Image (cartoon, rainbow, N blue to C red):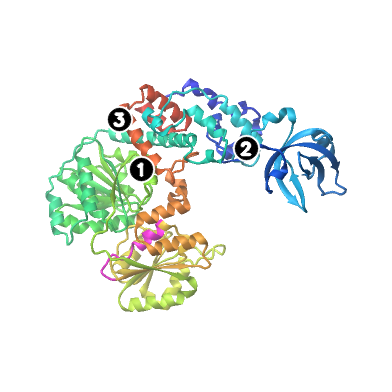
Amino acid sequence: MSRPEVLFPLFADLETLDGVGPKTAQALTGLGVEKPKDLLLLLPHSGIDRARRASVRDVVPPTTVTVEVTVGSHFAPRSKGRPYRVMVTDSALEFQLVFFHARADYLQKLLPMGQKRLVSGRVEVFDGIAQMVHPDHVLGIEDAGELPQFEPVYPLTAGVTQKVVAKAAASALARMPDLAEWIDPGQKAKEGWPDWAVAVRTAHAPTSNADFSATAPARERLAYDEFFAHQVTLSLARASLRKAKGRPSVGTGRMQQAVLAALPYKPTGAQTRAASEIAQDMAAPLRMNRLLQGDVGSGKTLVAFLALLVAVEAGGQGVMMAPTEILARQHLAGLVELAALAGVRLDLLTGRDKGVERARKLEDLAQGRIQILVGTHAVFQKDVSFQDLRLAVVDEQHRFGVAQRMELGSKGQSVDVLVMTATPIPRSLALASYGDMDVSVLDEKPPGRKPVQTALVPTGRIDEVVEKLRQAVAEGRQAYWVCPLVEDSEVLDYASAEARFQHLRAALGEDVVAMVHGQMPAADKDAAMAGFVAGRSKVLVATTVIEVGVNVPNASIMVIERAETFGLAQLHQLRGRVGRGSAHSTCLLMYQSPLSETGERRLKVLRDTEDGFRIAEEDLAMRGAGDLIGTAQSGLPRFRVADMERQTALMAVAQSDARKLLHDDPALTSARGKAVRNLLWLLDQDRAIRLIAVG
């Protein structure tokens, strides 16, 4: 799809703008400005009141003031490094203009004695005398009209000044075409939003501080445009995922009933609800693309297994994918009993399967003898083929982006996709990252999970902690000890896993303590984990490889060293590794004092609640969206005006509007659809544009 001609002027080179040469154009890229259109959304973040006053007497310094003055005597500095002073008088007061490193001839031309000038700048009182150091503006009275009453202040980067950015922005604004409206007319009228061009001009010409508020109509409209463009992109991705016609998979319920009847507990309401949402999606003729989101210990495995059984009952196969070999084996261990109850054949395929063994598994898969396969990415290699793959469950500890989700769908002819995440995601982020998916949330804990007692302990008390561990081990309990880093690095004075491992072995006994870390060969890692699961070792020293999915019911103590260096969500995940058995569990957050204010706030939130969603909301409030998901791999959109954290409601409206639009006009060919195409070009939604082109 080619770019509409009406937008050409906004996509020209920056150097076509007033006052922009090659150097300035290069510098502007530091603000994310590469084309004139980018300046339209580079909005001022604050403003300076430049309204004229009669006299400096009328304000309380230090503050910015604009007054008309008569220029008096000039006093050049006597020695180097001293300031140059010019006496001026307004209607009621004499004060000084002060300049450093200025040339006398330049100042005499700028401020000729006896003439009137308009000066604007910050006034301060020094030794009882009012001074304006380096006025921002000095204008002849006939040019006074050039100074706005309220001057916008733009974000800056090295190599550009306010004047340069303001001039370039004004030049970009002058090229704005008149574009047809893309917002739903009812929505626009209800909110009282201005037209797009009016909104952009208004946002660049604030008249008071109220205009910088996120709820000012012009800004709110521009924020909505960004959310809407993003959600249209996600909805197009969702449509193209679904366009591959799904195959209805209707379960008989026979295997599911067998499993549910044999469980020692009753599933929670949330589990039952999620399972039925998934079964309905699978029975529909469209491809399922659903996210199953649940907190630590909310019972996602059971829900995912029931979904896999629907695929088997319907005569097909299911696959469950984990990001690492350890987790794939863990899933297998967790599903073995359930599979036995259901009478289905379950098997594991990882990169480690070789030769005859691998060939046998591939043959069984192709013949449909293996009904449910658990594995790592190895299940997507070219030579792996299923007899009839109906459902892929992805345990996404690694953020599985929209692109990977689309790739996954291409393995089976029309595979339903269920993505599981154990990270509770605040609603705004869920909309931004998973707007192309339907979401099921598990927000209840199954009965029998005991709360974990959490305590904060300064590192100075490490000996007491080791002593406590010795007693616990003597009573037959098991513990995790999580370290921050693997290599000893002088720069970061962390106790490395290696050193901590040696220290704990010396204190507790050689055969008591085992270790896993990211640099170990996979076989050693598995062996160490297996020894801990079997109870041969009692204390497992680990880096965060144990973060997700590890299940050792007998482990009831979690020690996290330098807890203040971890993110809240990560700490919450780690704590979720204990409290899985019948024993009373504790989690000790060891920190290096003194803690920063936010460090303390984060650890206290964790101590006071076990609700993952509350913790995620708090994390979002403290760190912002990019950090929460790690912007590099999150694929999270970068918004210029919109604020994902504070404008969740707006994002939700944008999502439902985008979905409705694409339902009514999937190829964006209506008048409004064509207007939306302009918006997608303006906001760099290249992916959306490619999807329409393909569509």
Q: CA distance from mark 1 to mark 3?
A: 18 Å
The residue that disc 2 covers is 27
Q: Residues within 10 Å of mark 2 (few under 14, many from 20)?
A: some
Camera-side residue of 306 and 185:
185
Quarter of image, res 505: bottom left
Quarter of image, res 445: bottom left
Task: Please identify the residue farthest to the top as the structure is shown.
Answer: 5
The residue that disc 1 covers is 434
The residue that disc 3 covers is 663
Image quadrant where one finds the C terminus? top left
Q: CA distance from mark 3 to mark 2?
A: 43 Å
Q: Residue at x 36, y 41 (%)?
A: 404
- Given the image, on which type of amino acid does mark 2 rest? Ala
- Given the image, on which type of amino acid does mark 1 rest? Tyr
Q: Give the tally of numbered discs.
A: 3
Q: Is residue 576 magenta?
A: yes
Q: Is residue 212 above or below residue 516?
A: above
Left or right of 112, for residue 496: left
The tag earlier along the polypeptide, 1 or 2, is 2
Image quadrant where one finds the N terminus? top left
Give the image location of residue 611, x and y in percent: 34, 58
Give the image location of residue 503, x and y in percent: 45, 74
